[in-house]
Image: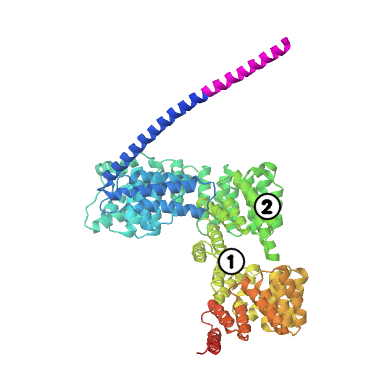
Amino acid sequence: MEQSTLTILALYGLFGIALLTLWLRHQSVLKQREQMQIRLGNLQGNLTSTSNRLDLLSRGVDTILGETPEVHELLSVHKSLESAESLLFEQDVTISSSESCAIATHAARSILSNYQSDSENKGRDNILPGVIPLVIRLDAILTEAEMKSEDLELNADEQRCLGELFHEAGKSTRASDFYRRAHILSPEGSSVLYSLASIQRDEGDLDTLDRTLERLLAINPDDIEVLKEQAILLSGSEDIRLSRNIRRLEALGVDFEISIDQTNSTNIVNRANNVQNEINPHLKDPSTTEGWVAKSNKLFLLGEVGVALESIEKALYLDATNSGAWLLKAKLLAAGEDRSKEALQSARRASALGEYTVLLESEILENQDKLDSARAVLEEWLEKNPSDAEARGRLSLVLFRAGAIEWSAKVLQEAPPESWESASLHVMEGRLHLLAADEYRDKTGNHDHIILLDATISFDLAIEKDRESGLAWLGRSRALRYQGSPKEAEVALVRARRLIPDHPSISLEEAHLCLEMGKLDHANALVSEASTNVQNHPSIPFIRGMIAARQGRFIEAQSFFTKVLLIQENHIRARLNRCSASLLANDLATALDDANFLVEQAPELNLAKQRRSEILMNLGDWKEAELELRRLLSRDPEHIMGLVHLGACMIAMGKSEQAEKPLNDAIRFDPTHSDAWYQRGLLYLDFGRIGEAKSDFEAAAKQDPKHLDARLRIAAISHEGEDPTIAVIAWRKVLDIDPEHRLARRRLQESSDRQETLKLRISPKD
């Protein structure tokens, strides 16, 4: 009894503890619910207060902007900038360069829609309140996106207006960029140059200011204020433009004399006193060798080679042992015409004084077409300095241009491991891979994606070593274009253009890319740009030939491809395309000559055999066409067009029973090939199997809705049938493809008449 009693008491105790625990938990839940109710009440009160404040703010904004509705439009500009920032920087999806430029252009135009430029009232008087902060925000977007004025699709006036806004916002560098772009797009406008000059004047950039003033005088030679300003800028120099300006002012009846007092009081010279006079090419002559070298270098950068040479001679007169002066003299002489020998002597003198000149020497020799001498200079240097990656890359390039491809690759293979830390060797390796890819494509008609992958890896390694290597980005763009990635190729090409804007291959590569993307007008413009920088390059007439061919101008395309072959006789793609253009222009003799050349020079190129067979079929030489097609099919048994053409040959030669197998094979290998269905339909028609023929013609029309011949055959079969309604539908489908087809119109009328006659015949009589 005692044991059972203890057990019962223990159970009661446990039950009591459980009840107590549940009661405490219930009390805790009640307390939490009360706290939540209090918090929700506070939150609701806060939301109500916030809503009231927003409503008050909204009504206040509407009241304030009520009399200035134009300012209200700035809210839409704010939304446009918000959208641009989101699309450019906050999206996980990568967008192309062209899309980025379009987004930034839209944002810029949204600001311009609220700005009216007024040349007579510049400054904040004609700028709406609130525009300047939006302009500063646009500047931040362009900076983050690494964009310049040339990236925005704006006309000259829009570029100028944006320049004015950036100028007013205190963004002088950005304003200068847009002013320069506006001047490039509209060289005859002077207002942009005045604005640009004001920025350069404020920044004390006297060299650039002088060039801007000269452009203004080219537009208006009698601008008195510009003549005075430039004369003051040139005071103390021997520049002939100083006397020119003074004479011109005298001719205009303006008394002008530069005095010391006037000079000291002039804003330009006050700013000029803050820079080093001895390194400014338009101020007083330097008194030291270093000053003359600096002056010469600045003149060289301005493109004034002749004056720069005079300055460097004065530097060498003061100190004939100045190595930097001899090096600069070599560069100046190399930039001139017919002075390569003197340039080489100066470079060797600089080398003897300790300057690094091996690349300059090789370039001078290469420009003289002395490739062997350029190679010898580089090889001699590498024997003593095998780790010089730049010299090794240059030697590989010289051999590459000379056609010694294996030797060029061997130079890279012999490079010590530490040399591969330079981007130049990886760029050269990538170029060799691209050449191998071109050769493989010319031989087979297809790209070897393993070689292209190796090229991409090489260019990526070069970019990893030097992200500012424009040649690496250019090579990467071409490799990606070959791989069928035009968007990525475009991004890499934009990067290359920014790094090496004057490189002649940029325009050519972009033209190739536009051609593959179907942008023929843009490609044509880029080829025109490239032709001004590159002479006698086969890519220029080749691209123009491709554009003409795609636009259906086959005779013109022939002439362009002929120009390519005059420059480079073994240009496989040019000859293949001339063959195709000649075939389409019905110049069968030229087409056959090109086809024979291709079959002999590139026996693995199946497309050449196909073209030759097509030409022979057009000439009616069915037997020779059959032999060529069988040679093609022996190499590639699944070549669809080869099988289709073989079937057509058999039909034409009266061997219809032998035509069915190749046509069946073509349909089995590629059921979507419309010509295979069409040719088999012709075969069945020849056999008298009308139903099967019509079925094949319908399959051809299904795979190619624009297949006119298939539609004509279907309509002709239906026309012979008993149901004119089906014939009417069939002839209308022919006219959907070719509305001017006379036979289809006549037969449609006949079928319609039959349809009406049939209706009258079967209509019930009263």
Residue 637 visible in image: yes
12 vs 643, nearest the viewer: 12
Q: What secondary structure is marked by label 1?
A: loop
684 vs 355, nearest the viewer: 684
Q: Which mark is residue 454?
A: 2
Residue 616 visible in image: no
Relative horizontal placement of residue 129, taking residue 417 as reference (left or right): left
Q: Is residue 622 above or below residue 502?
A: below
Relative horizontal placement of residue 555, taking residue 629 as reference (left or right): left
231 vs 186, nearest the viewer: 186
Residue 68 spot, x, y in % from top left: 26, 48
Mark 1 to mark 2 CA distance (whole Å):
26 Å
Residue highlighted by disc 1: 538
Residue projecting furthest to the top: 2
Magenta segment includes 7: yes
Specify the amino acid type for callout 2: Asp
Helix, strand or loop: magenta stretch = helix
Magenta region, residue range? 1-27
Q: Which mark is residue 389?
A: none
Specify the amino acid type for callout 1: Pro
